[in-house]
Amino acid sequence: MNRSTRLAVFALAASLVLLSGCAASRPQEGAEPPKRQLSDVMDPNDRSLISEAYDPWEGYNRRMYDLNARFDRYIFNPAAEGYKRVFPGFVRSGVHNFMRNIREILNIYNAALQFRFRTAGRSTGRFLVNSTLGIAGLLDPASEMGLYYQREDFGQTLGVWGVGPGPYFVLPLLGPSTVRDAVGFGVDYAVWYYVDLFGYRSWASDQPLSWPTLLYAVDMRANVNFRYYEMGSIYEYLWVRQLFLEFREFEIAR
C-alpha cells in the first residue's frame, strides 16, 4: 500500500471510530448509523488496500472473531437493543454518564503517566464537577463547561513509553486488541478494582448476577454502531484489524 492510500485508509478509520464516539456522547438517542459506508469511498473487497500486520495467531484470532460475532448477534446486541427499547433516553443518558464518571480515575492516572498534564487536569475537573453538580455523575455539566471527555488507558500509556503493540490478539467478548493493550486492560482493571469510587465496585459485586456490571457492558454496546459481517467485504476480519491498529496508533500519537 502506498503512502497516499495508507493516509486515506487511516483517515477513514479515524472518522469511523470518531463517529462511534460522537454517537456515544448522545446515549439518549442511541448509537447513530454511520453516515457513510466503507463502500462509499473505496472497494472493501480490494485486498491491496489492506496493510499487513503482525498477526502470528491469526487462526485463533479468526475463530475468536467468529465466536464474538455469534455472541454479539444472539445475545449482546439483542440485549442492547432491548435496553434501548425498554428504558427512556434520560435513563440511558444517566447510566452512561455515571459509568463514564467512575472511569475518570483511569483517564486521570494514565494522562499523568503520559505527562499529558493538561488532559489529566481536564479529566480531574470533569470528575469533580460531575461528581458534585452532576449528582454523582448522573449528569454531565462538565461538557457544557468545555471540559470534554477524553478516554485514556494503560495500553496507550505503554505506547507513549515506547512499548510496541506486539502480536494482534482478539480477546473473548472484548474484541480486537494487542498483547500490549491486553496487558494494559489488566492494569486498568486492577486500578479500577482497588480505587473503589463511591463504593461502586463493592456494591456492584454484592448484587445478584452482578447486574450493574452487566448493565455497564450493555450500555457500552448500545452506544457502538458496529455490526459484525455487515461491512460488505469478504475481508472484514482484515479491515477490522487494520482499522483498530491504525486508530490505536492515532490515539498514542495525538
Image (cartoon, rainbow, N blue to C red):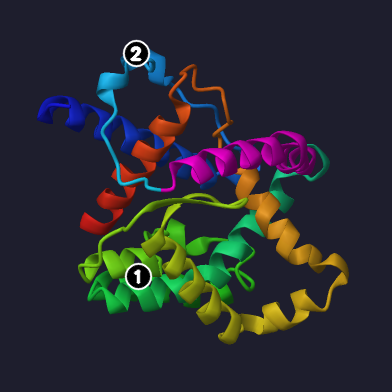
Does residue 33 show up? yes
Q: Classify mark 2: helix, strand or loop.
A: loop
Q: Nearer the viewer, mark 2 or mark 1?
A: 2
In the displayed structure image, the side of residue 250 where residue 33 appears, left or right? right
Q: Which residues are magenta?
A: 57-84
In the displayed structure image, the side of residue 10 where residue 185 appears, left or right? right
**Which residue is pictured at 26% across the width and 73% down the height?**
114
Does residue 151 show up? no
Q: Amino acid at mark 1?
A: Arg
Percent x, y for residue 181?
41, 61
Q: How many marks?
A: 2
Does residue 189 lie above or below 221 as drawn?
A: below
Q: Nearer the viewer, residue 7 or 23?
A: 7
Q: Quadrant of residue 119?
A: bottom left
Residue highlighted by disc 2: 43
Q: Residues within 10 Å of mark 1 (few under 14, many from 20)?
A: many
Q: Are marks 2 and 1 in contact (CB under 8 Å)?
A: no
* Residue 66 is covered by the magenta coloring: yes
Residue highlighted by disc 1: 122
> What label sits on residue 167 in the rendered view?
none
* Residue 129 is covered by the magenta coloring: no
Percent x, y for residue 53?
29, 41
